[in-house]
Amino acid sequence: MRVIFASLLIFGFFQTEGFSADILVRRKSASSIQMRQYGQRRVQENTDKITAVKFSSEEEKQNYIQNLDPSETEWEENITYSGSDYSLNAQVQAEVASEVEKDPLLANQWSLFSSTTDPNKFSGVDIDAIRAWNITTGSDNTIVYIMDSGIVQGAEPDLQGRVTSYFDALNPGQFPVDQNSHGTHVASIVSAIGDNKYGIKGVVPGKIQLGIARFLNASNQGNTDSAIQGIDWILSDYQSRLINNPSLLCIVSNSWDGGYSSFLEDEMAKLKNAGCFLVLSAGNNGRNNDQVPDYPCNFAKLKGGSICVAATDANDKRASFSSYGPKSVDIYAPGTQILGIVPGIMQGSQYVSRYEQKDGTSQAVPHIAGVADLIWSANPKLTQSDVYNILVKSVDRLPGADSEVASGGRVNAYRAVLMATGQDPSLADRGLNSQAAGGGGGCDLSHSKQNATSSNWFVEIGLSLLLLFWLRRNAIAAFQLRADKALRARDRLQNDVDAKNL
């Protein structure tokens, strides 16, 4: 029997961008003679039992598998994982006439700042980030690891100084240059620098550390072997940091998904057991993950130290592409038309920043990773389970969401940091969809207030319908505009009635 690329079989030292293993082999005993024959010990001690093997033919593969001793080894196919982008929308230019909150493009970041948001009105579909920033903008005592396609290298002003460690599973020893734009976009949603009079603002605009683990290639795909390498590096990097800073907190952002791998589940469980909080994508299949599992969202061994995220649109509805599941998916976060940084271009000696809007649960995940960072920045004494409970109990409740995600709502950063610091979470209420935050986070509206609000909506509907009748009779072109207003009024009434019945 012959093994092709024998010198390339082991994770880490020799794997290159073009190498893709066929199977992964895990030895049950560190003393396996057969594995020593083909294997080489990894630097990270926790993965010295896994080997990636590539064959020249299917026959060679089957012969190899048949000769494995099941008492000493187990194997599985090398599964492909993809970044959870759904679509790519038009590029947004950096030149904006006015400045909003010292970051010119914040006005285009509806998920953080909605120009229609009024704390006293039922209109907020954003995560209420601006009020959360009055409590905390981040801390350098938390590191957020981005498991993705890498990050832009060089002079991007909004990411300067953010990356404090990095690893490239596809080109070991090299800086993890983003060849797809997915990883840079995700990283910017979490951490774009705030108040620098440039570009956009991240969920964590203040102090933050980023660790970049690249395992997705230029096509936004990666395999189990490269994913495990990235996870092992994160574990090693975090544990080495704890030596000098025992209080350092760890969040891992995972905007990718695929099929089941027991090897991958075991390796990710090591991150959870080390104290890292894992943020996972529900996927973009538009299906119920309770019925058709998606991974790593549905990895059972990650429960208690992870949260799985679905995506909402700018109307606070489940994005059409987003997967869901009231048992397996935990929370909603914005995931459509999300503005973020992509690798820029050089014009002569000058770096020109570029921005794009992207859709996907990939964009929802970094919103939750960022809010988790704010929670821990506000109260570093909290445990992983504390962070999870605050996230799901501080949501803005959405009509019908109980049948889609466990929390029944979309993340609210302000209410989350209020709860993290022991303050009154009802301060974050912005109307009906924040009435009851995850079963105890919010403050119920009074019965009399509900009746008064219902009466107001009846009046508005009546007036709107009368106006619609007049407009139609006179064939005025503004008909559709008022029709939309009437429908919104009707929806508000229904939401009010739903809230009353909670």
Image (cartoon, rainbow, N blue to C red):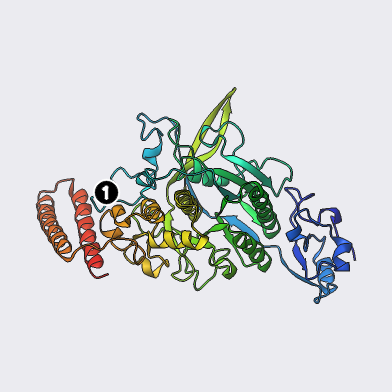
Q: For the point 74% across and 49% down, which residue is it?
A: 18
Q: Is residue 35 left or right of residue 180?
A: right
Q: For the point 65% across and 59% down, which residue is it?
A: 80
Q: Position of residue 355 (x, y in %)?
A: 48, 38
**Residue at label 1?**
119
Residue 6: image quadrant is: bottom right
Image quarter of the N terminus: bottom right
Q: Nearer the viewer, residue 281 or 140?
A: 140
Q: For the point 58% across and 28% down, which residue is it?
A: 346
Q: Position of residue 230 (x, y in %)?
A: 67, 53
Q: Is residue 248 left or right of residue 387?
A: right
Q: For the point 76% across and 58% down, which residue is it?
A: 45
Secondary structure at badge 1 equals: loop
Residue 460: image quadrant is: bottom left
Q: Position of residue 205 (x, y in %)?
A: 46, 40
Q: Is residue 97 left or right of residue 489?
A: right
